Image: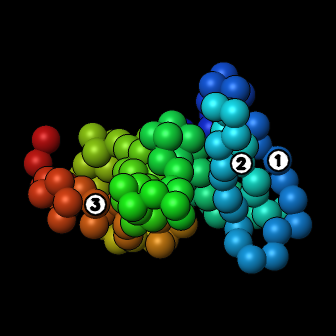
C-alpha cells in the first residue's frame, strides 16, 4: 500500500488529513462530532509520512482514542490497536513471507521493500512473531 492509497482511504472514510508545523509530535489525531481529524507535521515525507499516517488512520479506523477521564480506555491499548491496524494494512503477513522468500533477509531490506521506516518494520516483525506467534518462513 502506497502513501497515496492511505490518503485515498482517509478521504473515502471522510477522515480529514491536514499538514501543520507541529512542534511536539510528528502526528496526532482526534475525533470530534463522530469525525476523525489527522494532523501530520509539515516536516514529514517518504517512509516517515507513510508510517505516521497509517498509525493515525489506525486510531480512526479502530475508534481508538483515549480519554483522560475514562479508566477503561487506556493509552497503551489505543496505541496497540493503531499499531495493529497499520501493520496489517501496510505489511500483510503473506506479503512479508513472500519478501523474505524472495531474498529480503534483514530489516533494512524489508523496510525498503515495503516503503516503511526500519522502526516500523521491526515493530511489524515483532507483532507477527511474538504477539501472533507466527512463523514468517512458513506459508
Instruction: Point out the residue furthest to the right here.
Output: 21
Residue 93 as seen in the image, left or right of residue 22: left
Percent across and percent down for residue 61 are 51, 37
Residue 13, quarter of picture: top right
Q: Residue at x 12, y 57 (%)?
A: 133
- Verify CB contact (< 8 Å) between mark 3 and mark 1: no
Residue 95, quarter of picture: top left
Is label 2 or label 3 in front?
2
* Quarter containing the C terminus: top left
Question: Where 54 sits versus 4, above or below?
Answer: below
Could you tell me if residue 89 is visible in this image?
yes
* Quarter containing the N terminus: top right
The residue indicated by pointer 1 is 18
**How many neighbours does mark 3 have within 10 angstroms: few (below 14), some (14-19), or many (20 or more)?**
some
The residue indicated by pointer 2 is 38
The circle on residue 39 is none
- Verify CB contact (< 8 Å) between mark 2 and mark 1: yes
Question: Where 99 sits versus 6, above or below?
Answer: below
The residue indicated by pointer 3 is 127
Amino acid at each position: 500500500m502506497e502513501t497515496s492509497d492511505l490518503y485515498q482511504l482517509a478521504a473515502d472514510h471522510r477522515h480529514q488529513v491536514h499538514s501543520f508545523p507541529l512542534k511536539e509530535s510528528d502526528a496526532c489525531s482526534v475525533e470530534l462530532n463522530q469525525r476523525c481529524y489527522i494532523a501530520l507535521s509539515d516536516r514529514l515525507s517518504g517512509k516517515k509520512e507513510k508510517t505516521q499516517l497509517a498509525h493515525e488512520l489506525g486510531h480512526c479506523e479502530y475508534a481508538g482514542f483515549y480519554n483522560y477521564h475514562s479508566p477503561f480506555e487506556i493509552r497503551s491499548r489505543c496505541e496497540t490497536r493503531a499499531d495493529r491496524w497499520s501493520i496489517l494494512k501496510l505489511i500483510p503477513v503473506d506479503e512479508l513471507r513472500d519478501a523474505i522468500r524472495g531474498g529480503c533477509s534483514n530489516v533494512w531490506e524489508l523496510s525498503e521493500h515495503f516503503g516503511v521506516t526500519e522502526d516500523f518494520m521491526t515493530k511489524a516483525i515483532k507483532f507477527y512473531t511474538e504477539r501472533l506467534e507466527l512463523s514468517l518462513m512458513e506459508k
